[in-house]
């Protein structure tokens, strides 16, 4: 059965989720909000930080809006599925087929159809009204952000002009004009010169990572800056098709930057590679696997419509993550195996434990593994702490109490190793979930064990 086949039961609806297409234009995004003011002696990096700060605020507004639209279409799909089930129970073949097509459009394209059948007209009208309302609220939320940023840029332009940095001042002026134009309501690209963009076969003629030889692609080491969303594999094709899945290999010395890589079906394998300011998403059947690699301002997310177990999967070993995050990790969106990895300045999402399941059993499962890792200057929710094992925490802040609904008799105690500065233990109302230990007393190493540096707000190999 292909992914485009719509299931015939309500249980099938529980296995689907709507697309996370947060980035639909060419965009360079910095994850990590910079606090800006009117400084003298400004330079290009300061302007870049200003752009990054603005881009992050806009991205967050759009992401929250997209979450609301995802939820809206999920509810719409549920209503269409109920109509479909009723048509099927009544033996009405034509309307059952029409409702199936409507359901497929809602789940895969986030669109409403045009074919008429009983009950759908009112549902489409409500959907259109609610979606328009959400998009209008998103646009309204951007206005004060843009206004604040224009004022900041005006200050930067004056200071750069006074400093004799006329080219940079002109670039800032262009940003101001773009923001004041009709098109200036989105994100801003960096004004810094781009590196030469290598063009691997399979990326040129199509946004899908496939070519006439199939989905086996190995990049030549170099810097790849995506100019549009790149899709790996095609889950709509028959399972026997050689183009259905992609295996994308990134050898040592490869850097993948900007925009979005979405694994519809397939596997990314990276070793000694660098990912920067990119959204890495995957549908059911998509896996990211990396060793000795760097992730600089990267978001991992579940994309696409299909859900089952731990749908999107991430495997990281001896990696470094800087200002990066996993969106809604846990069932049914995402599972990960993270070992011997260093997290720096990461503000992490809580783990989503499946309702009715035992969080302790899930935390001890293979696909919620965080082991022998090193956390530095991070913000970590209790649910994320609960899945860690033998990890060191330095200068971290622990999230407020979460009711994990741990079943009686299954509670386990997580040891949190601290560095030279003792950390306040998590607020544990249930008591016994966490205990603090001195990390210096443990002989086994924590973290990635690879040399890296953070300079000018960017993560790189040393």
Image (cartoon, rainbow, N blue to C red):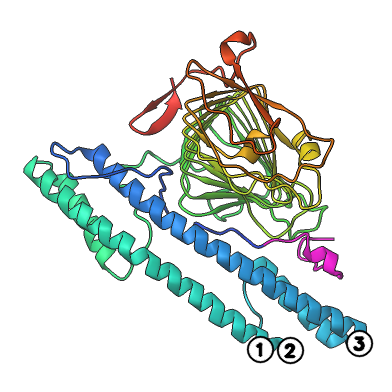
Residue under pointer 3? 90
Q: Height in image: 393 above or below 137?
A: above
- As measured in the structure, the alpha-carbon distance from the residue carrying label 1 to the one carrying label 2 is 6 Å
Q: Which residue is mark 2?
A: 119
Q: Residue at x 44, y 55 (%)?
A: 59
Which secondary structure, mark 3? helix
The quarter of the rendered structure image containing the C terminus is top left
Q: Residue at x 55, y 78 (%)?
A: 130
Whole-Å distance between the Cαs marked 2 and 3?
A: 15 Å
| First to last magenta residue range | 1-17
Above or below 351: residue 62: below
Q: Earlier in the sequence, mark 1 or mark 3?
A: 3
Residue annotated with mark 1 = 122
Task: Using residue 65 as the reference point, say whether residue 409 is left or right of it.
Answer: right
Query: Are the two marked residues, 1 and 2, in contact with CB atoms closer than 8 angstroms?
Result: yes
Residue 411 sits inside the magenta stretch:
no
Q: Residues within 10 Å of mark 2 (few under 14, many from 20)?
A: few
């Amino acid at each position: 059965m292909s992914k485009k086949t719509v299931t015939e039961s309500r249980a099938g609806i529980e296995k689907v989720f709507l697309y996370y297409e947060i980035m639909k234009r060419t965009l360079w995004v910095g994850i990590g909000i910079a606090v800006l003011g009117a400084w003298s002696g400004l330079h290009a990096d300061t302007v870049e930080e200003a752009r990054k700060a603005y881009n992050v605020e806009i991205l967050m507004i759009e992401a929250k809006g997209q979450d609301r639209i995802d939820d809206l279409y999920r509810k719409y799909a549920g209503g269409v599925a109920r109509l479909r089930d009723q048509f099927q129970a009544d033996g009405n073949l034509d309307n059952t087929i029409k409702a199936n097509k409507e359901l497929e459009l809602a789940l895969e394209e986030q669109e409403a159809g045009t074919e008429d059948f009983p009950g759908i007209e009112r549902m489409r009208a409500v959907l259109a009204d609610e979606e328009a309302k959400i998009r209008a609220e998103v646009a309204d939320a951007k206005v004060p952000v843009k206004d604040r940023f224009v004022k900041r840029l005006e200050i930067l332009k004056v200071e750069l002009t006074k400093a004799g940095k006329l080219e940079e001042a002109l670039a800032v002026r262009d940003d101001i004009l773009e923001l004041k134009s009709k098109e200036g309501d989105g994100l801003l690209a960096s004004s810094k010169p781009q590196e030469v963009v290598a063009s691997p076969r399979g990326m040129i003629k199509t946004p899908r990572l496939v070519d006439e030889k199939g989905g086996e692609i190995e990049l030549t080491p170099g810097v790849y800056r995506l100019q549009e969303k790149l899709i790996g594999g095609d889950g709509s094709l028959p399972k026997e098709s050689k183009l259905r899945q992609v295996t994308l290999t990134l050898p040592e010395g490869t850097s993948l930057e900007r925009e979005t890589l979405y694994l519809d079906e397939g596997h990314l394998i990276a070793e000694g590679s660098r990912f920067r300011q990119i959204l890495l998403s995957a549908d059911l059947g998509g896996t990211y696997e990396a060793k000795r690699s760097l992730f600089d301002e990267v978001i991992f997310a579940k994309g696409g419509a299909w859900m089952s177990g731990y749908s999107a999967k991430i495997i990281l070993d001896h990696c470094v993550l800087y200002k990066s995050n996993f969106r809604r990790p846990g069932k049914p969106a995402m599972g990960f195996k993270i070992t011997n990895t260093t997290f720096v300045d990461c503000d992490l999402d809580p783990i989503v434990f499946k309702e009715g399941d035992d969080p302790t059993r899930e935390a001890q499962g293979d696909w919620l593994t965080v082991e022998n890792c090193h956390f530095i200057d991070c913000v970590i929710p209790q649910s994320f702490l609960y899945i860690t094992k033998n990890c060191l925490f330095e200068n971290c802040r622990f999230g407020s109490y979460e009711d994990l609904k741990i079943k009686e008799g299954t509670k386990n105690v997580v040891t949190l190793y601290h560095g030279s500065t003792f950390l306040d233990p998590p607020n544990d109302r249930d008591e016994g979930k966490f205990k603090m230990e001195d990390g210096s007393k443990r002989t086994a190493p924590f973290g990635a064990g690879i040399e890296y540096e953070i300079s000018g707000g960017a993560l790189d190999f040393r």
